[in-house]
Amino acid sequence: MHGELGTTMARKRYGIVKTYATCLLVGFLAGILLSNYCKNKFFSRCGLPDICCEEIGLSTSNSPDDNAAKTSDGQQNENPTNNFVFVGIMTAKKFIDSRGLAAHRTWVNTINGEVRFFSSEGSISKHGVPVVALPNVDDSYPPQKKSFMMLKYMHDHFLDQYEWFVRADDDVFVKGDKLDKFLRSINSSKPQFIGQAGVGKPEELGLLSLTATENFCMGGPGMIFSRETLRRMAPYVSNCLQNLYTTHEDVEIGRCVRKYAGIQCTWAYEMQQILYQNYKEDKGSFKKTLKSKEVEKAVTLHPVKDPVYQYRIYNHIQSTIIMNLHQKELRLVREVTMMEQLLGLQKSNIVDNKLGILPSLNKYPPKSEEEVLTWDFLKKPIYSHNHLNPKRGMEASLSGALDDVVMQVMQLVNKNARQRGRTIDFKEILYGYRRTNPLFGADYILDLLLIYRKHKGRKMTVPVRRHAYLQQSFMNVLFTEEIPKYHPRPSVGGQVINLFRQIAGGSDDQKALDKRKETIHFIMPLAGRLKIFQRFMRNIEDVCFKSGENVRLHVVLFNSEKEDMALERSIDLLQKYQRNYGGNNIEIIQANGAFNRGRGLELGASKCKSDALLYFIDVDIVLRKDALNRIRLNTKQGFQVYFPIVFSQFDPTTVCQDDSQHCACPSPNNCLIKPYDFHHDTGYWRQFGFGIAAMYRSDMLSVGGFDLSIEGWGKEDVDLYTKFIESNITVFRSIDPGMTHAFHPIECDASLETNQMTMCINSKAQSYGSVWQMAETVYNEDDIMRRHEKHSLDVRS
C-alpha cells in the first residue's frame, strides 16, 4: 500500500514538474512572438537592413565615408545621428593617412558621436579621413597653437550639439563603448575637466609655474571637457596663447581652464587606469602588454605609435566581444537542452547535443586504452609523453591560450566585485594540467595564485590559492565562400546564372577562375642519384602524365662527381619521357658548377613566366594526386604562398628490423617503408622543413628570391621562408598527406658553416627513428643502462 501510494505521489510530482516546464516554455515562446508583433505594429523599422527611411525624412547612414563627406568642407553637421560626445584628434599632415587612417578605420566607428582630425592649414586626406585644416596653424612642435585652436573650433561649431568634448592625440586608442558608459556616470551640466592628473617630471619641479595644489591633465591619454567647461574657457583662447609660461601645451591648457573655467583637472587616482598611459613598454604600441588587466579596464590606451597596432588592438577587442557572444550562445544552448530534457524531447542534431552537454571532465568515455585522453603537465616547461620532446618550453600559442583563459576566469570572478566589496587579482599559475578533446574542446585544471582585496568593512589584502576546472567548448564549424579580389561577388541572380553556365560547360571567364585546372610548374634541381630519379619519374608519370594533369616538369641537372655517367643517363631518361608525353611537358636544363639547390631552383624558375605557379620539389618526394589541387588552391598570386608540412620517413633499417607491418620487403635485403603509412614509428611531420614550397613567380621575385651566395647543404629554403614572413604575403602551412619524403642517408660535409652543420646534424639525427624506438634500443643495452653499476664496481676494486 505504501509502495503504491509512493508511486502515485511520484507520478503526480513528475506531472506537476512536466506541466510547469511546458507552461514556462509556451509562455517564453509567446512572449517572443508578442514582442516581435509589437515591434512591427507600433514601432518604426527605419534603420534595419534593406529598409528605406527617405519617406519620413530620416537618414541612417553612419558609414565613415558618408560622415567624411558631410564634414570635409569644414561646416558643422546640422543633424548629427548621435549628439553625446565629440572627439577631436590632433594630428599632422604626415600622419593623417597613417595613424589617422588607422584610427578612422578602427575605433572611430565605436564613438557615440562624431570624430574629426585637426591638422595644419592645407591638410587633406587621400582616403576620406574627416580633416579640419586649421587656418594660420602649422605643424611645428610643440603644438600649442594647434591645440588651443582645435578647442576654439569645437566651441564655435559644436558647443550646443554635444555634451562632452575630448581632445586626444593621433597615437591614442579609444574604446567608444567604455567611454560612453564612463561619461554617462558623470553630470555633464557642471563644469568638468577630466584626465590623468600631472604635475610635471621631477626635473621640471618649480619650472612650470604651478603651486603645490595645482595640476594639469596630461595630453597623451586624453583630456575630457564638459560643455560648460568649454563654454567658459574657449572664448579666452587668444588671451591664453598670449600668456604662455611653458612649452607644454597640456600644461597651458590646464592653466587656461583653471583661470577662466574656475576648475582644474580631477585628482582622482582611478584616472590612471581609465585613461591609461603605458609606461611598461619604451616604444609603446602595446606589443607585449595587450592582454594585461590594465588594458582590459582602460577607456583610452596611449601611446600606439605604430598604425599597424591600431588594427591589432581593434581586432583583439572585437575577438573578445565575439568570445563573450559565443559564451552567451553556449549558455543559451545549455538552457534549451536542460528544458528539453525536462520535457522529454529528443534532439536529432548531434552538434547541438554536444554543445548542450554541461561542463564535465567525463564527457567522452573511452572504449579502449588507446582512446584514453592524457594530460600535459604545465609549469614553466611542459611535460608530455605524447611529444617527441617530453620536456619543452611553452609555445607562444599555448601561452596566449592560457592568458585568454585566465582573463575570462577573472572577468567572471570580478563580475559583481563592486557589490561584494572585494576584488580578486590574478598573480600567477603555479601549475596545471591541459588536454584537448577533438570532439568537445580543451580542458584545463589550473592551480591559481590570486590576491584577494577587500575594500568594504574590514579592509584586507591576502594571497589565496584556488583550483580552477575549466573547459573551452568547440563551437559549430562555419563555412564561408571566398571570392577573389579581382572578381566581385555577384548578386543572387548572377550566382544562379553562373551555376547554369558551369553545368553547361562554363564561359571563358569561369574557366579562367577554375584553379583546379591551372598549370603547375615543377622545379627540381638534381645531381646524380639515378635510381632515386627513376623512382621519381615513375611516380610523376603515374600521378600526372598518364592522368592528363596540367603540369610542366623543369629538371635542372648538375654534373655529379660521385656517379659517373649519371648526367647522361638522366638526360636519356628524360628524353624517353619527352617522346612518350610530349616535349612541352618536360624541360631539361643543364647547370654549370657544383650542385647548389638554391641556384638550381632559381635557374628553373627563370624559365617560367611571372604569373606561373611554381612548385619546388625534391627527388625524394613521393607524390599523390590529391596534393595537386592543394598546391593550386593554397596559393594566391600576390596574397599567399604554400609551404606544406610533408611526412618524412625514418631509416627503414630501424623500422623494418622486426619485419614490421609498416614495411614492404620485395627481397630479404631490400625493405622500404610504405609511402603513405603515417605512423609515429614510420616517420614524422617535418614541421621545420621549408624546402618543399608552392608560389607564383611574381611573388618569389617580389621578396628577392633565393640567396645565391649560400653554398652547401640547406639554409637557402629557410632564407626564402623568412623573406616571405617579413613581407605582406601570407604564408600558409599545413600538413599535406599527399607528399611523403622518402628516406635517404644524409651526409654532412665538414666544410659547411656552423649553422648549416648544426641543421644538417639535427636533420640526420631526427631521421634515425622515433623517440620510442631509440629509447627501446637504449633500454636493451646493458652497457648503457648499467654504466653506473659498472663504475661503482671499478671504484671499489
Image: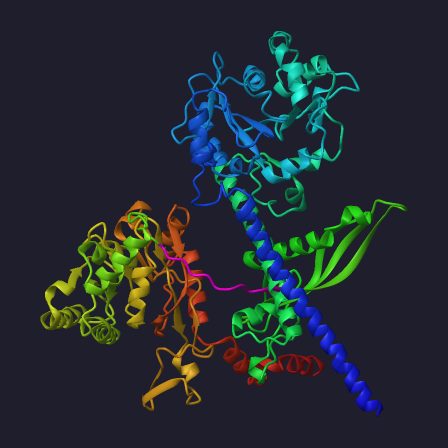
Q: Residue 403 vs residue 629: left or right?
A: right
Q: Main secondary structure of the magenta part?
A: loop
- Please provide percent x and percent y for residue 771: 51, 75
- Please provide percent x and percent y for residue 708: 29, 51
- Please provide percent x and percent y for residue 647: 39, 71
- Please provide percent x and percent y for residue 567: 17, 68
User: Vertical placement of 234 versus 97: above or below?
Assistant: above
User: Vertical placement of 794 versus 390: above or below?
Assistant: below
Which quarter shows the C terminus? bottom right
21 or 483: which is nearer to us?
21
718 or 416: which is nearer to us?
416
The color scheme shown is rainbow
Q: Residue 631 vs residue 77: left or right?
A: left
Residue 738 seen anywhere in this rendered image of the structure: yes
Which quarter shows the N terminus? bottom right
Q: Residue 35 vs residue 510: left or right?
A: right
Residue at the outermost left position: 579
User: Vertical placement of 157 versus 386: above or below?
Assistant: above
Residue at position x 73%, y 54% in the image: 413
Residue range corresponding to the magenta coloring: 472-482
Q: Is residue 60 magenta?
A: no
User: Toward which corner of the image does residue 521 lie, by quadrant?
Assistant: bottom left
707 or 138: which is nearer to us?
138
Residue at the outermost front position: 41
127 or 711: which is nearer to us?
127
